[in-house]
Each structure stands twice: as structure tokens, then as C-alpha cells.
Image (cartoon, rainbow, N blue to C red):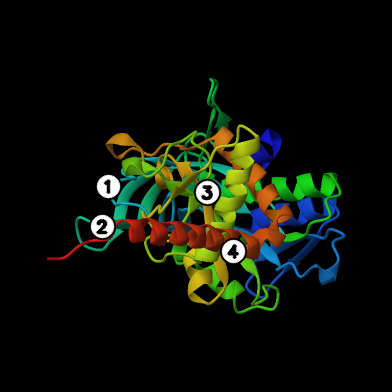
Amino acid sequence: MKQLLEDILTIPTIALKEHAIHNALAQFAEQHNLKFQQDSAGNSYITYFGDESPSAGRKPLFITAHTDHPGFIVTDVNDDHAICEFRGGLSAEYGKSEYLRVYRITSHDVSIAAIGRVQIQEIMTQGAPPRQRIQGATVLSEPGVQLEVGDLLLWDVTAFEISNGSDPKILARQCDDLIGVVSILQTLKNLSETSSPYSFTGLFTRAEEIGLMGASAATNGSVLPDDAIVIAIETSSGAGGRAIQGGGPIIRVGDAGSIFTPKVTTWMEHVASNLAEKTDFKYQRLLMDAGSTEATAFFRLGLDTGALCVSLGAWHNAGPNQKIVPETVSLRDTEYLVELLSALVKNVDQYDEATELKRKSQVQHTEKSVALLADHPIQLQ
């Protein structure tokens, strides 16, 4: 998986300019003999078809991640200066005097070329304190760098690295949400290489960072069926004790906007607990309410929806002392996430069973409770 992490996490991407990521997805599907398609919004779908019988009654499973990350796009050029729009969410405390790497989408939108560096001269803001956000910036090019309208500007930090140690960390400019993309791709790869009989579709959405656009559009398309189970994968801020890096992937019961489908959460926890009993697998179960995720869009539009995430350090590259730094996730958490995704694909037939087991357990507890309390009545005077 390490090579796949490097291949995907180093591809420059921002909202509405996710071309290179989606080209890589199409190439991945072709390489592994998987079905690739796109909807009218440009969301990509990769499907692994197992040989399971259509009469099995299994609900279709879609696992989704978004393909954009916050960054700037050049909107106006004047000699060696340019004005840029910021697509994403980040406090206006950040960005002052930071350097950005310049990338240019080449002809026919098939590749991205590295051009050079620029430095931020002034941050443009929106909103009122204390919640001012970056709206854009003016930048100054280094000598020899000729900016063009449409160039992508990404923070000049480590593009990809894996630390040493007993619990290695992935450091990258774009963990959010390319870690989710890699996790789905690795799951597809594992199932196809082992000729698994179980099917699922990876859904790779656009423009999450500017308002869950791709996820919302996917529910209006022809690929995602109304009876699907949708699991949204994210990297989510672990700040404030929300989660522990290295503690395993997180079954996310909700976010800042919604509590997701309880039946999906119950099923995911059932599968995860079975894994933990048999192996060294670890997981967490938390709300993770630092922000909203695509699961909110799917859930509000009526789909059976759950969410998984891994704990993210330096959310949107926000480091200490208002400095821009690489984002971080635990490599072990990411590997465990792939293990859990594979188990969920293989156990969709337990979707109804998990809830029924919980109900039966509660019925047994109810019977015990009634008998115990009957043996200890309250005598009123």
C-alpha cells in the first residue's frame, strides 16, 4: 500500500480541478480490470464485480471518499504578481508569507506540471472575527516563474513521507481526503487479486471542500441506487481529544450536522468487534463533530448512510503558531481501515442480522430486568 499512498497523495488537487486524480482512478481501474464510469457531475465510480448470485439479496454497497483538498487557483495575473482564490476552509490566521508550489494543468486536462514557487504577500479574508476564513491571496512569483490564470497553488510542505518508529505516521500535504481514496483503491485491489466473490463500488466525489458538491450531485445521478448502503470515508480532526492516532479507524456515528443511520453504524460495529476478537485489529467509536462530512449529504437525502474516518493531525495543514505544516495520519490506522472495509464488503449479508442480534440481546436483558425488579418491589406507605 505504501507505493499507492505515494502515487495518489502526491497528485495536486483542489475543488473543481481534480482532473489528475480522476485520470489516475481511470488508469487504476484499467490496470486491475475493474469497471470505471463517471456521472454527469464528474464523480468517478470503480466497481469490483464478484461472482455472488443476484438472488443473494445483498444490498449494493458504495464506499466513498472525496478527491479535493484546500488550495488556491490563480484568477488574475499582473506581471510577477497574481490574485488567487482559495477553495476550502482555513482560518485567516494562517498563510501570511507562506510559500506555495505552482502546478499547471496541461493540455486536454490529462496531467499536471510543476512550475515553481510563489510567496503570499497578502491574505484576503471573509467573515467576521473570530471566524475569519481565507478567501484568497495576492502572491509574488519567484524569478523565472510565469503564472497563468488557472494555475493551482498548493502549500510548499512535504508532499509525502512515512516516519520511522513503532507507530509510523504518514505526513503529506493532502491526507484529506486522499487517504480515503487510497483506502478504497487498496480494498478494490485486494478483492480483485484474491478473486473475492463479493462486490462493491468505490465512489470518488468532487468539490467536497466547497460544500459537499460532488456527494450531493451523486444522489441525483443514475449510478447510485436508492437502496444502496453508503459509507463515507474521511480523515477527521483529532484535535481536542476527539480521537487517538494509532487507536484504529473510527466508526463515526455522526458529525457537526447529522447523526447517521443507526442500522449502518450497528452493522459496522458488529463487523469491527468480530474482527477485534479474532486479530489484533483495533477501532474506535466516536461522534467526530469538528465539521460536516459527505455522510450528511447522503443521509439527509434518504440513503442508508454510515461513516468511517481516521484521526487527522494538522487539519487542512493548520500547524502550531499559525504555521502551515503537512497533515498526518497513522499508517497503522490506515491499514486497519482497509482491513475493516474488506470485512464490511464480505459481510453485507449481516446488515439486517446485526440489528436483530442487538434487538434479541435487549429483549433478553428486558426479561431479566422485569424478573429482577419483580423480586424487589417498592412498598409505598
Question: To which residue does mark 4 refer?
Answer: 356
Residue positioned 33% across, 46% down in the render: 121
Please determine whether, in this image, residue 163 is positioned above or below residue 223. Answer: above
Question: To which residue does mark 3 refer?
Answer: 146
- Binning the other alpha carbons within 10 Å of mark 1 as few (below 14), some (14 to 19) or many (20 upward) gives some
Residue positioned 83% across, 51% down in the render: 196
Question: To which residue does mark 1 refer?
Answer: 93
- Type of the residue with mark 2: Gln
- Binning the other alpha carbons within 10 Å of mark 2 as few (below 14), some (14 to 19) or many (20 upward) gives some
Quarter of the image holding residue 347? bottom right
Most foreground residue, 193 or 351: 351
Q: CA distance from mark 1 to mark 3?
A: 28 Å
Q: CA distance from mark 2 to mark 4?
A: 47 Å
- Counting residues from the N terminus, which is met first, the one under dot 3 or under dot 2? 2
- Binning the other alpha carbons within 10 Å of mark 4 as few (below 14), some (14 to 19) or many (20 upward) gives few
Q: CA distance from mark 1 to mark 2?
A: 8 Å
Q: CA distance from mark 1 to mark 4?
A: 50 Å
Q: Element at badge 1?
A: loop
Q: Element at badge 4?
A: helix
Q: Residue 342 at x, y = what percent?
A: 70, 48
Badge number at residue 311: none
Res 306 seen here: no
- Counting residues from the N terminus, which is met first, the one under dot 1 or under dot 4? 1
